[in-house]
Image: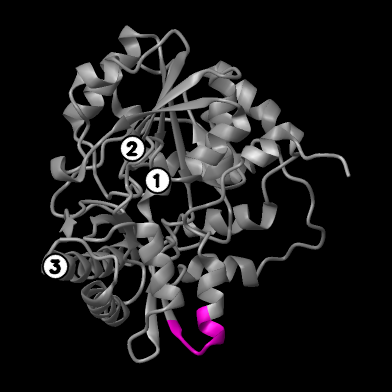
């Protein structure tokens, strides 16, 4: 049998999904599993979006434009203008989810073996995207004890080499929920200008900020039109993770032309989902107000409960719907598997995402997990009760 490519052999599994077989086995044994491992909200998708799926008058589902339907791109431009992001439909490439937008951005700005700086912990799929693009992630380590804020400039500058081409930030951050301040983003801007780097800003969680925090888009900053790339998605904004529509936004015409050529190679993003996404732009403000209140309640239940458990370190996130928790365990991977294989409380258990997969630095995140507060308040409260009981009897607990 011919051997697989080295690329295939080196492609890492998703730490968010790698414990799925254990969860499925637990369910076969009659155990209810609360899924806190994945960012799949139970928030209803807006009715206007669902109606667009149900009530379309399409007779033939044709190819669309490789850059996305012009009506949807025009609608997106109006959406961004509401956030003081001045772009036109010609400066937007619609992609098959935000994932494709990130891959397009990486491939447009970097050659094989070039380097991309990313604050860690980071969205674990960045590792897979970088692997597909053939580029190297150089992590900028951030710590829970510091609230996951950016480290001093010196620590970032020490990571820059002749192969460094890009800084990627996720704001608000997945997995930490951290919201970067204007001062931090200004530092990123200055570093990019001083060292001739591109900036990719993943702003999928733009709407979800709490406690008076303010989200600043990378496209708000002057002097970087030639190097700033915004990537986005409808998945979390409208609780429509299965629709797989994202976009790449930039003022840089060369990047747009390059991304379009990549888009032409896959022909077009999904047409029906774009029609539904266009309808979703008419989602009333009341929807987001209710969603924000709900996520805030869930966050407070989770963080308040975690902070009461001896040995747990957990900061209250200001954005998104995740938090990283440092647990008093020997190994979060083993603990998470043990929860599914050996532990239950009245035939119920929880599924977590071990956080070591959200770091590129070996040895980091060994005792940390990411918790997604995406279930209703009753389910989140029960999940924290189960987690507390599990930690009290886990054989690998450490002081």
Residue 43 seen in this snapshot: no
Q: Which residues are magenta?
A: 26-32
Q: State which quadrant residue 54 falls in.
A: bottom right
Taking the spot 46% from the left edge, 76% from the top edge, the residue there is 341
Circle 3 packing at 10 Å, graded few (<14), some (14-19), many (20+), is: some
- The alpha-carbon separation of the residues under discs 1 and 3 comes to 23 Å
Give the secondary structure at mark 1: helix
Looking at this view, name the residue that lies furthest to the right: 1
Circle 2 packing at 10 Å, graded few (<14), some (14-19), many (20+), is: many
- Residue that label 3 marks: 304
Model colouring: one colour
- Say if the magenta span includes residue 63: no
Q: Is residue 133 left or right of residue 249?
A: right
Circles 1 and 2, Cβ within 8 Å, touching? The answer is yes
- Residue that label 2 marks: 120
Q: How many marks?
A: 3
Quadrant of the image for the C terminus? Answer: bottom left
- Residue 108, above or below 265: above
Q: Residue 390 at x, y = what percent?
A: 28, 76
Q: State which quadrant residue 79 falls in.
A: top left
Taking the spot 45% from the left edge, 68% from the top edge, the residue there is 46
Give the secondary structure at mark 3: helix
């Amino acid at each position: 049998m011919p051997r697989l490519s080295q690329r295939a052999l080196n492609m890492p599994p998703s730490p968010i999904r790698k414990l799925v077989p254990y969860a499925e086995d637990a369910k076969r044994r009659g155990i209810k599993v609360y899924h806190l491992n994945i960012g799949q909200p139970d928030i209803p998708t807006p009715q206007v979006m669902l109606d667009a799926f149900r009530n379309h008058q399409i007779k033939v589902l044709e190819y669309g434009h490789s850059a996305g339907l012009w009506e949807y791109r025009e609608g997106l431009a109006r959406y961004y203008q509401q956030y003081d992001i001045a772009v036109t439909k010609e400066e937007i490439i619609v992609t098959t989810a935000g994932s494709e937008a990130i891959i397009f951005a990486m491939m447009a700005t970097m050659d094989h073996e070039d380097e991309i700086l990313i604050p860690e912990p980071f969205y674990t799929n960045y590792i897979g995207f970088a692997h597909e693009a053939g580029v190297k992630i150089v992590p900028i380590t951030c710590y829970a004890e510091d609230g996951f804020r950016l480290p001093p400039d010196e620590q970032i500058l020490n990571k820059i080499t002749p192969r460094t081409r890009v800084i990627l930030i996720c704001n608000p951050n997945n997995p930490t929920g951290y919201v970067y301040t204007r001062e931090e983003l200004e530092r990123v801007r200055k570093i990019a200008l001083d060292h001739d780097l591109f900036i990719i800003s993943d702003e999928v969680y733009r709407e979800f900020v709490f406690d008076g925090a303010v989200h600043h888009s990378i496209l708000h900053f002057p002097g970087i039109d030639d190097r700033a790339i915004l990537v986005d998605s409808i998945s979390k904004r409208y609780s429509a993770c299965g629709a797989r529509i994202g976009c790449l936004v930039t003022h840089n015409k060369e990047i747009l032309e390059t991304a379009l050529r990549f888009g032409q190679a896959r022909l077009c993003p999904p047409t029906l989902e774009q029609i539904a996404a266009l309808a979703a732009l008419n989602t009333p403000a009341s929807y987001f107000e209710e969603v924000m209140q709900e996520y805030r309640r869930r966050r407070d239940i989770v963080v308040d409960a975690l902070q009461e458990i001896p040995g747990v370190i957990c900061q209250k996130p200001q954005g998104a719907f995740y938090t990283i928790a440092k647990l008093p365990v020997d190994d979060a991977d083993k603990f998470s598997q043990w929860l599914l294989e050996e532990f239950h409380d009245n035939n119920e258990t929880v599924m977590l995402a071990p956080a070591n997969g959200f770091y590129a630095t070996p040895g980091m995140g060994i005792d940390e997990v990411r918790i997604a507060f995406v279930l209703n308040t009753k389910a989140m409260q029960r999940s924290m009760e189960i987690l507390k009981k599990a930690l009290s009897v886990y054989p690998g607990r450490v002081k």
